[in-house]
């Protein structure tokens, strides 16, 4: 079978005059979404319509499309045995009446019938009220005449009793009927109110805006044709997320790469073929231009004459940035030790992006909620280290150094860490290129302890016109594990914001591995199983005699 393939971009939006409108045969395209490529901030949907065409000119209409679709992104492809020329393409806006008008008419008819019944009930209540008023008038009038009638012996007492009973029973029956009618009328009113609410909702949703794409075809030879319409839509995207599980021997880790997909494009994606791409089609292909960058000398405003200057209290102490370790396990699924086999995505790499094809169809409703799918599983070799910052916390943290051995980069995203089946926290993974080393923390290790104490403080005033303050600290580390480990210890020296302040590290009992310009000091302390060691170091601060130092 001869196969023809056509591609039309929207830059050839209209080719007027090729086909007369009067000669076009209108064909509605019965099409559903078959494939979706999800980008970080939008999605490209593809839908197909299969047609059998005879020679002639046709207008194929893809209607009920989301109003959010980006007109500039629309393209049409054709494949089949028919000899076809795609002569034009047009995008239109429309308001969908759908079944809203019919629904409103049906509700109006139901409301009319119930209101008529309610009117009938009201008429019955009016009749009963008239009957009751008549009987009440008889009872009042009879009370005025009863003494005169009894004086002449008529009617008899028995006759009076019978007449009174008739009046009383009549009023009682009328009241019962009126009460029943009131209940019936209230039920009818409740139904009418409910129908009116439904009618209001139908009126609010009956005019839904949509778009349609009309494709003009000139068919020279009879045959079949499959048209594929691809459109780009905002309000969709995906983000990567990871689970990294450290093995029992801490020699390897299992990385599970998941994608969380969400969309609010205006239509559900049911059983669609999904590809996840790292490309960003919205950014365009042209680099931005740099604008001139101006700088100037700062000219402070002169102080107001009435302003009073206050000498503030001592500046707050130098703050040390503390790492935050989160242990929010909400939403983390329990994963059994023996896991079932998981299908993973197929990788395809382009020059500037990576795409992952999900091997099974997905259902993703247009509700904005996140739907997860496994993209990849990987076993990573691990080198374990331990880090302690005793100035901030007595915990010793377990750190794993790993290498991304996959053929694709690990994208920035949230990573949940586990030791075995125990959740240890979450962090934010940076972008890790293929072959690059990265590290993650897996919480604290209770079998390693650390303690830091200030053991000495000494201040001297006026020595050679300068003040001197000395401090000494002791750090104790104990290894309760059954194997030897090396613990990385971090502390710090203060940073002087004034050239007249001199700071020095004094007599550390263990030579530092590194003393950085930002004041950070790093030691490596090897420990045998069960061993305890101490490290001490001093800090000297020297400053002018007439000045004070804040932050110590």
Image (cartoon, rainbow, N blue to C red):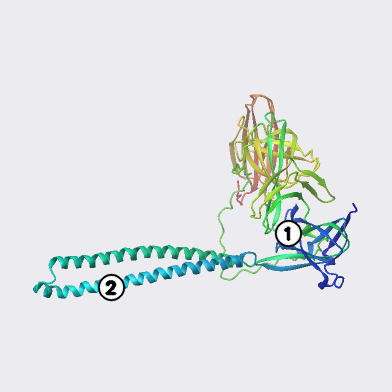
Q: Residue sitting at 65 percent across and 24 percent down?
A: 482
**Mark 1 Cα-neighbour bin, 10 Å: few <14, some 14–19, many ≥20:** many
Left or right: residue 388 compared with residue 122? right
Judging by the rendered image, the residue that carries numbered circle 2 is: 133
Q: Nearer the viewer, residue 142 or 75?
A: 142
- The disc label shown at residue 233, or none: 1
Instruction: Tell me if residue 532 can be seen.
Output: yes
Tell me residue 123's x, y (percent): 38, 71
SS class of the residue under badge 1?
A: strand
Tell me residue 522's x, y (percent): 70, 38
Tell me residue 236's x, y (percent): 70, 55
Left or right: residue 382 compared with residue 323? right
Q: Is residue 170 above or below residue 223?
A: below
Q: Nearer the viewer, residue 513 or 245?
A: 245
SS class of the residue under badge 2?
A: helix
Count of labels in the image: 2
Residue projecting furthest to the right: 2
Q: Nearer the viewer, residue 15 or 483?
A: 15
- The disc label shown at residue 21, or none: none
Tell me residue 44's x, y (percent): 76, 56
Q: Quadrant of residue 14?
A: bottom right
Left or right: residue 400 compared with residue 184? right
Q: Quadrant of residue 246?
A: top right
CB-based contact (under 8 Å), mark 1 and mark 2: no
Q: Nearer the viewer, residue 230 or 379?
A: 230
**Mark 2 Cα-neighbour bin, 10 Å: few <14, some 14–19, many ≥20:** few
Q: Quadrant of residue 403?
A: top right
Question: How far, Cα to Cα, is label 1 from label 2?
Answer: 72 Å
Marked residue nearer the N-terminal end (1 or 2): 2
């Amino acid at each position: 079978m001869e196969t023809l393939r056509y591609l039309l971009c929207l830059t050839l939006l209209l080719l007027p005059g090729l086909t007369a409108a009067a000669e076009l045969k209108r064909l509605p395209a019965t099409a559903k979404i078959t494939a979706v490529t999800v980008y970080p901030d939008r999605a490209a949907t593809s839908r197909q319509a299969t047609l059998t065409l005879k020679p002639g000119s046709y207008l194929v209409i893809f209607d009920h499309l989301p109003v959010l679709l980006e007109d500039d992104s629309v393209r049409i492809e054709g494949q089949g045995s028919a000899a076809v020329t795609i002569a034009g393409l047009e995008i239109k806006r429309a308001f969908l009446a759908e079944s809203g008008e019919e629904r409103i008419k049906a509700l109006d008819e139901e409301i009319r019938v119930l209101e008529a019944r309610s009117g009938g009930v009201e008429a019955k209540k009016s009749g009963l009220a008239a009957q009751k008023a008549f009987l009440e008038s008889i009872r009042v009038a009879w009370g005025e005449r009863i003494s005169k009638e009894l004086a002449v012996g008529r009617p008899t007492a028995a006759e009076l009793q019978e007449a009174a009973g008739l009046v009383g029973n009549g009023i009682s029956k009328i009241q019962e009927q009126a009460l029943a009618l009131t209940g019936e009328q209230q039920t009818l009113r409740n139904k009418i109110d409910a129908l009116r609410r439904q009618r209001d909702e139908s009126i609010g949703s009956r005019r839904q805006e949509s778009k349609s794409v009309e494709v003009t075809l000139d068919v020279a030879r009879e045959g079949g044709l499959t048209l594929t319409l691809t459109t780009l839509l905002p309000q969709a995207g995906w983000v990567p997320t990871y689970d990294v599980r450290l093995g029992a021997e801490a020699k390897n880790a299992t990385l599970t790469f998941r994608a969380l997909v969400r969309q609010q494009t205006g239509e559900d994606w049911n059983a669609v073929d999904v590809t996840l791409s790292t490309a960003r089609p919205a950014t365009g292909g042209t680099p931005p231009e740099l604008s001139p960058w101006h700088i100037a000398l700062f000219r402070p405003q002169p102080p107001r004459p009435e302003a009073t200057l206050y000498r503030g209290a001592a500046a707050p102490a130098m703050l040390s940035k503390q790492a935050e370790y989160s242990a929010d396990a909400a939403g983390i699924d329990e994963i059994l030790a023996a896991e079932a086999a998981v299908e993973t995505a197929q990788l395809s790499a382009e020059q500037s992006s990576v795409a992952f094809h999900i091997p099974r169809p997905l259902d993703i409703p247009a509700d904005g909620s996140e739907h997860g799918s496994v993209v990849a599983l990987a076993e990573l070799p691990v080198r374990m280290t331990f880090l302690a910052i005793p100035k901030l916390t007595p915990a010793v943290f377990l750190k794993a150094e790993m290498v991304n051995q996959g053929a694709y980069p690990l994208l920035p995203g949230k990573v949940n860490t586990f030791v075995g089946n125990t959740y240890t926290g979450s962090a934010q993974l940076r972008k890790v290129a293929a072959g690059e080393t990265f590290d993650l923390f897996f919480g604290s290790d209770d079998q390693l302890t650390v303690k830091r104490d200030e053991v000495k403080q000494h201040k001297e005033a006026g020595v050679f016109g300068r003040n001197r303050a000395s401090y000494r600290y002791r750090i104790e580390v104990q290894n309760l594990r059954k194997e030897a480990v090396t613990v990385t210890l971090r502390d710090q020296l203060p940073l002087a914001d004034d050239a007249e302040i001199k700071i020095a590290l004094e007599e550390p009992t263990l030579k530092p591995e590194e003393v950085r310009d930002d004041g950070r000091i790093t030691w490596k302390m090897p420990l045998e199983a069960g061993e305890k060691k101490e490290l001490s170091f001093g800090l000297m601060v020297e400053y002018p005699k007439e000045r004070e130092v804040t932050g110590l």
